[in-house]
Amino acid sequence: MNSSPVNSELSPHILVLGMGGTIAGLAPSPELNPLAYEAGQVEVGELLTKIEQMLPDGLNIISRQIANINSSNLSEPLLTELGQQVKNALANSALIGIVITHGTDTIEEAGLFLQATCGKYAEKLGKRVVLTGAMLPSNAIGADGPKNLLNSIQWASTAIDNCPGGIFAVFAGKVCMARDLAKRHSSNISAPLLDSPSTAISLINPSWLALVKAVQAALPDDLPIPDAEAWPWVEIFTSHAGARTELIRQSINAGVSGLVIAGTGQGGFNSVWQESVDQAIAAGIAVVRATRTGAGIVRPNIPEKDSEGCMAAGTLSPPKARIALQLAINAANESSVRGASLPPRWQDFFEPQTYQDPTNT
């Protein structure tokens, strides 16, 4: 294992990037209260030291700390840094695969971001990028982080015949596509992929593998990674009983670039918002409807006809839809700057990200 990658990157290696999170957290009283802890306290190199004896002989591991944060504080500039480091590392012919330790609170956003910006590149090169983390801090009894990290390294270095390259996630002995991550429980050990299509790492389910290949074939080319300060401003508004219009109007007046509506049921929202939403669209603000339910598909013109220009999020959760919308707006902006004869609209870049698994209803 090598945390000083100057020369080691010239030989075959796995790169482990540290972003912090619970996997790097410490609890003051781990035996009495392991859920009271501070995230992002342990360096990724130290996490690797704990599993060093269990790693395959001769496997060269390089570690690099990008951040060490509570993932609730994940920022767009950090996503830019992560995406650029992943893309640059993938270009190294000596790289076998990448593992990223990340907090689970916003891991679904990081997963969607990496899939949308680096997924096709990783697939083309036949290399795996694997997100992982933990639900218990590193010093808790029965901490899940070491096993997740070990399994992730094994998955990143598994022969390509078993599964194509791409962006994946590993938790609790299972693997899923990173775009399918969805934390649906506050403390369950399997929370980040509890409801996601997945398979056991030790025995790959052929139907899951077929699904992965179908999704990868349907997903579009990678979108550009926004510059750190160029991310479009997109907000999420959750529809609820007694909803009011003031915050939406304030966002419109403040110059927001996009709105994601976390609607009820199939993406419907309180009718008092309709006028403000139409005003946003008329002002050139991108609007997407998602659902606050946590599962299912939001379809165009259901339950009611969409306003012209509004898009349905498909299976994307509101946080994922927000990332996809930011990337879509940025891609459209970059196309306009390049002077395309017919500049694409943000909808042209967003819609392909909403690919729906035909078995998911």
Image: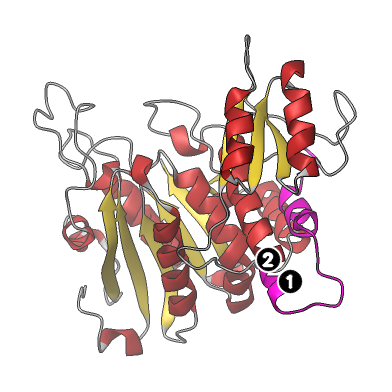
Number of marks in the rendered image: 2
Is residue 239 visible to us here? yes
Q: Quadrant of residue 301?
A: top right
Residues at badges 2 and 1 in contact (C-beta under 8 Å)?
yes
Q: Position of residue 183 (x, y in %)?
A: 48, 34
Magenta segment includes 354: yes
Which numbered circle lies on residue 252? none
Q: Residue 99: x and y, percent?
A: 39, 62
Using residue 169 as the reference point, say whether residue 118 is left or right of it.
right
Place of residue 259 in the rendered image (x, y in percent of width and height, measured from the top left) = 65, 39
Judge from the rendering whether residue 131 lies leftward or rightward of residue 279; answer left or right.
left
Q: Residue at x 57, y 67 (%)?
A: 118
- Looking at the picture, does residue 111 appear above or below residue 243? below
Q: Which residue is rendered at x = 45% and y = 84% of the image? A: 92
- Residue range highlighted in magenta: 333-361
Amino acid type of disc 2? Asn
In this view, the residue in front, 183 or 229, is: 229
Circle number at residue 333: 2
Place residue 237 in its image quadrant: top right
Q: Residues within 10 Å of mark 1 (few under 14, many from 20)?
A: some
Residue 336 badge = 1
Name the residue at 62% across, 25% down. Answer: 292
Examine the rendered structure and indicate whether residue 143 appears above or below residue 255: above
